[in-house]
């Protein structure tokens, strides 16, 4: 699938999006290059209608909590 031009432009100062990796019911995942850290990254982009429904504060908190749970779980191993 092609990467939407609006997404490329919105993230152009931070990431170079290469291609879509996959999609599900809530989001699409893209392969991108992070030039600041010289590495490949996966960007998970929530569907616009879900992002609007959750709002930026709620979305950020949810993602942060999820990521911290993963980080803590990996430390315990």
Image (cartoon, helix red, strand yellow):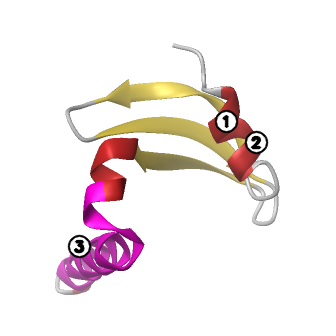
Foreground of the two, 63 or 77: 63
Q: Is residue 56 rendered to the left or right of residue 62?
A: right
Element under disc 2: helix
- Give the residue displayed 59% in from the left and 16% down from the top: 2
Q: Position of residue 20 (x, y in %)?
A: 51, 26
Horizontal and vertical percent position of residue 47? 35, 41
| Distance Cα–Cα, label 2 vs label 1 | 5 Å
Determine contact: label 2, label 3, CB under 8 Å. Answer: no
Residue 9: mark in rendering: 2
Residue 36 occupies quadrant: bottom right
Query: Which residue is under mark 1?
Result: 6
Q: CA distance from mark 1 to mark 3?
A: 27 Å
Magenta residues (range): 53-74
Q: Which mark identifies residue 66?
A: 3
Q: Quick check: marks 2 and 1 in contact, CB under 8 Å?
A: yes
Q: Please indicate whether residue 7 sits to the left or right of residue 43 in the image.
A: right
How far from the left and from the top, in percent, is residue 23?
32, 29
Q: Secondary structure at mark 3?
A: helix
What secondary structure is the magenta-colored segment mainly? helix
Judge left or right: residue 57 versus residue 15.
left
């Amino acid at each position: 699938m092609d990467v939407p031009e609006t997404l490329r432009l919105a993230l152009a100062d931070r990431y170079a999006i290469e291609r879509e990796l996959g999609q599900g019911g809530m989001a699409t995942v893209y392969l991108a290059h992070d030039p600041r850290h010289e590495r490949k990254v996966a960007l998970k982009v929530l569907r616009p209608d879900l992002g609007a429904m959750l709002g930026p504060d709620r979305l950020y908190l949810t993602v942060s909590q999820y990521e911290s749970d993963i980080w803590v779980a990996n430390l315990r191993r």
